[in-house]
Image (cartoon, coloured by chain):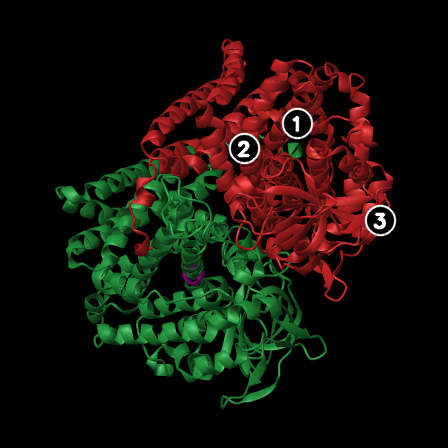
Chain colours: A red, B green
Amino acid sequence: MAQYTPPLRDMQFLLHELLNVVDELKQLPAHAEIDADTINAVLEEGGKFAAQVTAPLNQIGDQEGCKLDKSTHEVTTPKGFKEAYVQYVDGGWPSLSCDPEYGGQGLPHVLNQCFYEMLNSANQAWTMYPGLSHGAYEALHAHGTPEQKKLYLPKLTSGQWTGTMCLTESHCGTDLGLLRTKAEPQADGSYKLTGNKIFISAGEHDMAENIVHLVLARLPDAPAGSKGISLFVVPKYNVMPDGKIGSRNGIYCGGLEHKMGIHGNATAQIVLEEANGTLVGEPNKGLAAMFVMMNAARLGVGMQGLGLTEVAYQNAVAYARDRIQMRSLSGVKAPDKPADPIIVHPDVRKMLLTARAYAEGGRALGIWTTLMLDKELSSTDEEERRDAADFVALVTPIVKAFLTDNAWISTSHCLQVFGGHGYIAEWGMEQFVRDARINMIYEGTNTIQSLDLLGRKILADNGAKLKKFGKFVRDFVEEEGTNEAMQEFVNPLADIGEKVTKLTTELGMKSLQNPDEVGAAAVDYLRVCGHLVFAYLWARMAKVALAKLDSGDPFYKAKLHTARFYFAKLLPETATLIRTARAGAKPMMDIEESLF
Amino acid sequence: MAQYTPPLRDMQFLLHELLNVVDELKQLPAHAEIDADTINAVLEEGGKFAAQVTAPLNQIGDQEGCKLDKSTHEVTTPKGFKEAYVQYVDGGWPSLSCDPEYGGQGLPHVLNQCFYEMLNSANQAWTMYPGLSHGAYEALHAHGTPEQKKLYLPKLTSGQWTGTMCLTESHCGTDLGLLRTKAEPQADGSYKLTGNKIFISAGEHDMAENIVHLVLARLPDAPAGSKGISLFVVPKYNVMPDGKIGSRNGIYCGGLEHKMGIHGNATAQIVLEEANGTLVGEPNKGLAAMFVMMNAARLGVGMQGLGLTEVAYQNAVAYARDRIQMRSLSGVKAPDKPADPIIVHPDVRKMLLTARAYAEGGRALGIWTTLMLDKELSSTDEEERRDAADFVALVTPIVKAFLTDNAWISTSHCLQVFGGHGYIAEWGMEQFVRDARINMIYEGTNTIQSLDLLGRKILADNGAKLKKFGKFVRDFVEEEGTNEAMQEFVNPLADIGEKVTKLTTELGMKSLQNPDEVGAAAVDYLRVCGHLVFAYLWARMAKVALAKLDSGDPFYKAKLHTARFYFAKLLPETATLIRTARAGAKPMMDIEESLF
């Protein structure tokens, strides 16, 4: 079975040594009381919960999966899932970063983010139950009526109830404008919803007494397409005005999907038969309301990728130290053994360090992004709020797509370190790969993320958000321009920064001639941007590590080596990506469809 | 469920229009009678078998898996597997390229190769039963005693019995020198074998009346390491001198592995308890004898990758034509529908064409390689035999590693085309990905392949084999140097050819200083060589397609477009690979092990 140790030291490095989150957060009135000890204590406890409570359930969840009783429409989650959720609720974990007005602890999002990374390392399938719940909380918090907030937010905050996002239908995933679920207005101002949803994660289960479904549907007079979609809250059990649970509502699980991975999470087909619902936000503005949830979910999916990258790395390192096989090409390293541990082989190290550099870079980006999210949500300075919002908007598709693609690469490498044993269920490595695959698809495929980045976030505002990000890079390059020891990091960073600027301008020009040029280049472009962000963060991490190298703490030595590995072996991927992005749409679009 | 159509037209193009296999084969006395009609007829029938008999069993094989009865040690294969095997034997398929002396049809290997591609597209797990059998046939044919050949080859040729390769033990996969299974000589010249093997594909099943295990073991006086390994034939049922089946031998299945994929194939733990065996080849030279089987198996694994790439492509194209979602960025393409089919989107096409270019390039390489194998085995000209053998030796690790890595990339892309539906078992796409993952591991991991290529096949003979290959490239570049229409293909081909030469020299020099430089660069280097071979083949295919473009057959137009896609979007991967190969061992080896 796979092992997991929460990476607390690396989190502390990022929080306190790289990003100084305490100083930053203290400037926000909502977090004026935060201190490092609180942060560290919460993370230590959170890490214990992940490592001791949910991690041991990861493999059994994969093997057992969820079971649907077709007669009652009730789903049984794998052994131990329910009990772990009780512990989660009893520990107050659901309320960590929730609004104190509804019973939340009001801790910063950056803390919740670190906690979720650990939960995802431990057990992605389990974590999706509270994860989606938190998304429903966010959407209701932002767009719910006072009545809805009063009824639902305290229960979602405490974890007594969970939530879902019901968007997809069998004929529409990416293109929600095609959806058909109908909402008929009732005399009392409520609605009756009828339709079929699919791929509803955490859509039905036995872990909480009620499930709060947020459902996209159409009003009878709704315009066609995405401008005619409204958002509704549709609980599994109707909720009485006093908050008590009432009769069973007409929304139920019609089937569960058999999936490649995340077996422990119930991916439900949800049937609505005149289910009672109430409108969230404005009529026909459901997509906008849903995007609050979606953006949070996209950051959350990035954290799933990060979590899997980290846990796969930890297990592969342990195996590579333990497994002896062949001798080092440069001479015997373990003469007392019949062969050397495979960690002596350069390519094994390359696979390990790829995962490590992607994990540590992804963690830095995740923490930086959610620190910015805390500023966006809580700063009293309008400009700071706007800048932070621009930053979060820009990097959200990068966090989602780059981190999940990296997780696919990394978990596969870590499986490979195990050789044939990696392919066997017993070791747990192949589950990480299978679980990782969904993260590139849901909450908007990674292609959709790339179109969001290049088309909407960058070209549509003439690169304004990107320029703001570029300033971080330029300032750092300038600052370190005369620091001899930093040249190995600053020079390639400056180089990739210039290349991104040039490439962006070029793609902007080409897209004016032919919008398909955006679609053709976007995926490559997003990875180039991902590397720009990572190169910046790795350079900054290297700076801190260099400054503390003399401390004797081997942590800094390791950090510096991993930074060097990143610049030598991973950043060069951009050489290919820039070429293929520039090769444009012609190689794909010149071919008549009939010739495929 | 996934669909499959045998790619007969593309095979015919490669066999008859690109490589002129009939003319080439006719020069070999063993194949003097071959003609195009025979080849085409065999492939058509073979394709029918794959598409109609084994393809429909692929999904059920995955779902059911194999079952071991622990009391009898007997394995039941999934529903329909046994019946399909009966049809396979009745159709004479096992004997296709076997020696007529033992009842084979003596057809060229290049034909068998095409047939196996189709079998692997249809059902990799099923195909491994006859595939491993054929490997055992090859090893006994090359190294068996006359007695062993007489007893076993006719039954392996007819398919009445199947065979396996028993190499791996739990503590040694790559490093067979560590193996512990013992063989005690008996008074009658036979041996009693005792030990435990794992990961034995097709190791136990209900499809044939006997299983001929080829087992690596140590003689009592054997030197330590890989120089003390001998090869034995150990049948499941003892074989009487008259060829009849005798008593049950002490070799049985102790357990089955739960794997990520290829569930339909029994991956057996094999226990030997004083099992009767006879020596194959010389004592302590077992590894050399096993390598006959291993080299054939490595080409076979490449074909597994190719087969999965092709079938994943076919299904993804069909889905991309059928699924409507969003509008094209460059304007509505299907005004009569509520959305455009997703094949209008550039990135969907990019994913599809990646799989297609890898499938068609891999098919060209597979056919070329086995044509060379036929020459190696059957030419009457010693130099031609040696040249062909050098070619096959050089490209075998490329076929194995490049084609299986490409299959991992391609099947994952094709899954992605399906969005969420790709993650659901029902559509069959995720099975292709899971099945594809093992091909990068078994018969020598892809890292081992790359070390074999760079270390043994290239640097150890001072690049002699590579130079011979380089001559193909130079001759073609020279030949087409003045052909205006071919410049778009010939120029990048010449460029990558020069770069490979330069990189090889550089790595050769570096490796003299530090052998770890080989291990650090080998994986990147192999992919660069793979692209060199593909660029050469794609340029040649483009030449044929250009010449026949006016024929009106849309096949040539599609081929030319795919060639252009390859050069524009896939070959540029070498830009990164050359950089990372040159970045050397330092970024991995400078880090002390304790810092991981």
Closer to us: B364 or A454: A454
Q: Label the magenta part by its dominant secondary structure.
A: helix
Horizontal side, residue A245 vs residue A482: left or right:
right
Magenta stretch: includes residue B299? yes
Could you tell me how far apart the alpha carbons at marks 1 and 3 are, in whole angstroms?
Answer: 35 Å
B325 w.r.t. A400: above or below: below
Q: Which amino acid does label 1 sit on?
A: Thr
Which residue is label 3 attached to? A245
Closer to us: B10 or B39: B10
Which residue is label 2 attached to? A398
- Subunit bearing disc 3: A
Horizontal side, residue A595 vs residue B120: left or right:
left
Closer to us: B475 or A44: A44
Could you tell me how far apart the alpha carbons at marks 1 and 2 are, in whole angstroms?
Answer: 13 Å
Residue A506 occupies quadrant: top left
Could you tell me which secondary element the residue under label 1 belongs to?
A: helix
The answer to whether residue B469 of the structure is visible from this angle is no
The residue most toward the left is: B482
Disc on res. A370: 1
Image: magenta residue range: B298-305
**Same chain, labels 1 and 2:** yes
Query: In the image, residue B571 lies at what x, y percent?
Result: 34, 42
Could you tell me which secondary element the residue under label 3 belongs to?
A: strand
Q: What residue type is labelled 2?
A: Ile
In front: label 1 or label 3: 3
